[in-house]
């Protein structure tokens, strides 16, 4: 467009060298301003999200090329040696588009505290400073521009001994991170985890826990195998499928819709598990029973359902989520040999 503009104005200005020179200078300034504006927009346009549960602390950056997620153990303490992971989800509706987006994501650099980590490496290991109370997770591009940051709190160091043995929650939610508690080195290279003899994906490790993601779409009673150096440990846990459904994600004022929460995979005669249902948009809808509610789920048929009415208080989109609360009861992993 600038070339077209330059040609048109040059024709108007004729052979006046001074005018043409002024035009070129002006166009150069316009181009520079456009580049600066683009860089500025990139820096300001990256959204940052923080999620912390009982097992994992994650910071996600929504960039122009897709998502970059940094995973750390949720039980961070000062002085810990930890391992973490970086996951990338490139934008694109086809392989070619995704490859271009992935190339862009590979150029990003994460700062975990003061440690610099290239996103393409996928994993990192560091020692949390002994005098810190927080870790800043910051993203920058290859030119060094800051694209956003978030802070994860760090608990004080303790002299308490690490947990003896290895344990896993009896019930967990399918397709969600799972934590094994125990005494760990904080280094992924020392451990291997499989679920039903399939490799699990390590996400984070601290001296007190190893967090992994089971293979996709596994549910029911699952066999867990942990390799710690030369030693093997075996156990099991039950993964429950939790779903939430409605006929719409938008409401009108005064109009009501039915919400259905379903848990699949419950065992006969097993104790109830807790399901947390949360209305994240109370300004848009009213959720029957309250905006945050924990309900016990128990069924001899293997499937449990909860129905709630959702009433619109204003026109707009809304978001309600349901998640399993990991059970406090833990199964012990037993030492074994292959």
Image (cartoon, rainbow, N blue to C red):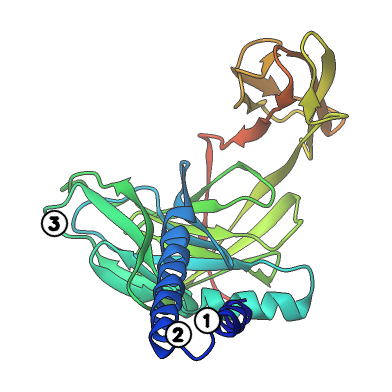
Instruction: Report crowding for label 1: few under 14, some 14 to 19, many 20 or more residues within 10 A (C-alpha).
Output: some
Q: Are marks 2 and 1 in contact (CB under 8 Å)?
A: yes
Identify whether 295 is placed above or below 35.
above
The percent coordinates of residue 83 (x first, y second) are 37, 67
Q: Which residue was labeled with disc 1?
A: 13
Q: Is residue 239 visible?
A: yes
Q: Which residue was labeled with disc 2?
A: 20
Q: Is residue 185 visible?
A: no
Q: Is residue 260 left or right of residue 70?
A: right
Instruction: Report crowding for label 3: few under 14, some 14 to 19, many 20 or more residues within 10 A (C-alpha).
Output: few
Taking the spot 34% from the left edge, 58% from the top edge, the residue there is 137
Taking the spot 44% from the left edge, 73% from the top edge, the residue there is 108
Mark 3 element type: loop
Q: Quadrant of residue 82?
A: bottom left
Mark 2 or 1, nearer chain start: 1
Identify whether 186 is placed above or below 57.
below
- For marks 3 and 1, give the CA distance: 68 Å
Q: Which residue was labeled with disc 3?
A: 130
Taking the spot 75% from the left edge, 81% from the top edge, the residue there is 96
Taking the spot 56% from the left edge, 64% from the top edge, the residue there is 64
Mark 2 element type: helix
The percent coordinates of residue 107 (x first, y second) are 46, 79
For this rendering, which residue is in front, 227 or 58?
58
For this rendering, which residue is in front, 239 or 46?
46
From the image, state whether disc 2 or disc 1 is nearer to you.
1
């Amino acid at each position: 467009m600038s070339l077209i503009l330059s040609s048109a104005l040059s024709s108007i200005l004729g052979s006046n060298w001074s005018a043409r020179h002024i035009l070129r200078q002006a166009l150069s300034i316009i181009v520079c301003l456009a580049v600066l504006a683009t860089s500025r927009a990139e820096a300001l346009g990256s959204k940052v999200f923080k999620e912390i549960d009982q097992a994992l602390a994650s910071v996600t950056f929504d960039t122009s090329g897709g998502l970059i997620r940094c995973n750390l153990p949720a039980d961070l303490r000062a002085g810990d040696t930890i391992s973490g992971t970086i996951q990338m989800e490139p934008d694109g509706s086809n392989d070619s588009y995704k490859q271009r987006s992935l190339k862009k994501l590979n150029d990003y650099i994460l700062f975990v505290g003061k440690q610099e980590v290239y996103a393409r490496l996928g994993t990192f290991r560091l020692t949390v400073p002994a005098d810190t109370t927080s870790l800043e997770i910051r993203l920058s591009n290859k030119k060094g521009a800051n694209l956003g940051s978030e802070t994860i709190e760090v608990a004080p160091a303790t002299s308490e001994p690490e947990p003896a043995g290895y344990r896993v929650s009896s019930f967990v939610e399918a397709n969600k991170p799972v934590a094994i508690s125990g005494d760990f080195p904080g280094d992924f290279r020392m451990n291997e985890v499989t679920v039903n003899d399939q490799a699990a994906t390590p996400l984070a490790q601290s001296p007190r826990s190893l967090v992994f993601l089971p293979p996709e779409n596994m549910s029911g009673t699952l066999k867990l195998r942990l390799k710690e150096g030369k030693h093997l440990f075996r156990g099991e846990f039950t993964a429950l499928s939790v779903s939430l459904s409605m006929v719409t994600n938008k409401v009108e004022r005064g109009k009501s819709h039915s919400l259905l929460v379903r848990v699949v995979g419950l065992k006969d005669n097993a104790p109830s598990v807790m399901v947390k249902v949360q209305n994240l948009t109370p300004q848009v809808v009213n959720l029957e029973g309250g905006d945050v509610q924990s309900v016990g789920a128990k069924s001899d048929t293997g499937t449990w359902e909860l129905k709630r009415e959702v009433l619109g208080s204003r026109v707009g989109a809304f978001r309600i989520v349901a998640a399993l609360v990991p059970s406090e009861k833990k199964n012990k992993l037993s030492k074994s040999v292959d």
